[in-house]
Image: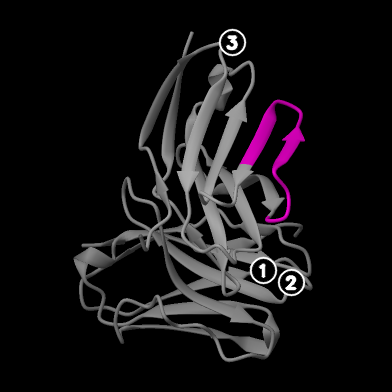
Amino acid sequence: GAGVSQSPSNKVTEKGKDVELRCDPISGHTALYWYRQSLGQGLEFLIYFQGNSAPDKSGLPSDRFSAERTGGSVSTLTIQRTQQEDSAVYLCASRGQGPEAFFGQGTRLTVV
Amino acid sequence: GEDVEQSLFLSVREGDSSVINCTYTDSSSTYLYWYKQEPGAGLQLLTYIFSNMDMKQDQRLTVLLNKKDKHLSLRIADTQTGDSAIYFCAESKGGKLIFGQGTELSVKP
C-alpha cells in the first residue's frame, strides 16, 4: 500500500497478557517511529529506528515495552504483562530521505 | 522548558482566520511541523518549515517561524467547519519528532 499500515486497528486484551502491535512503513522509508497517545493527550515518543543505527529507546516507559525492526522494514512493538495504564492509541510513523513523516491510523489498545 | 507548548483550545467563527501558536525547545531543530488530527483518525501532515525560513505559505495555511523566540504559528485563512480538529506542532530533535499537546480548534458556523 501507499501509506503506513498498522495492525490490528483495535486490540482488547486482559491485564497481564502480552500484546504485539505491527507497523508496515512506507516502502523505502529508513526512519520509523512509535508514539503513544492516551485519551485526550498529546503524543508521547516511545522509540525511533533510523536505518541500521541503534534505535533511540529513550521514550520507552518501562522494561515491559520493547520494539524490533526486522530487515529495516516491518516493526513490532511488544508490551509484556499489560497494565490498564497501557490503554492508549499506539501510532507508528515513517520517514524517507525528506523531512516529511507520515503516520498510520494507529492501534487502539484496551487493557481490561 | 523541556516541552513543546501549545494552548489547548481555540474557538473561531466560520470565515475568520485562526492562529495557532506553539513554542518549542531546541534552537537546533532543523524542521518544524504542523499536523492535523480529526476525531478517531491518525495524524495528517499539513505542512513543515525549514529552520532557515521565516515564513511558508501553502494555500490557506501560513506558517511563521521566529527562531529567536522559538515560536511557531499556523494561520488558517477563511476557516471552515471542516478545519475543526486538533492541531499538533512538532520539532525535530536528534532525528525524532517531539510533539506539543495539541490545540483543539472549534469552528462555529
* SS at mark 1 in the image: loop
Q: Is residue B8 above or below residue B30?
A: above
Under mark 2, the amino acid is His
Q: Which residue is mark 1?
A: A25
What is the magenta range? B51-64
**Identity of the residue drawn at 69% across and 84% down:** A51
Q: Dot 1 falls on which chain? A: A
Q: State the image coordinates of residue B74 (x, y, percent, origin top left).
A: 58, 35
Asked whether disc 1 touches disc 2, contact meaning CB atoms under 8 Å apart, the reply is yes
Q: CA distance from mark 1 to mark 2?
A: 7 Å
Spot the residue most to the front: B68
Same subunit, tags 2 and 3 = no
Mark 2 Cα within 10 Å, few/some/many (few <14, many 20+)? some
* SS at mark 2 in the image: loop
Same subunit, tags 1 and 3 = no
Residue B93 vs residue B102, the one in the foreground: B93
* SS at mark 3 in the image: loop
**Identity of the residue drawn at 76% across and 34% down:** B58
Quarter containing the C terminus of chain A? bottom left
Q: CA distance from mark 2 to mark 3?
A: 38 Å
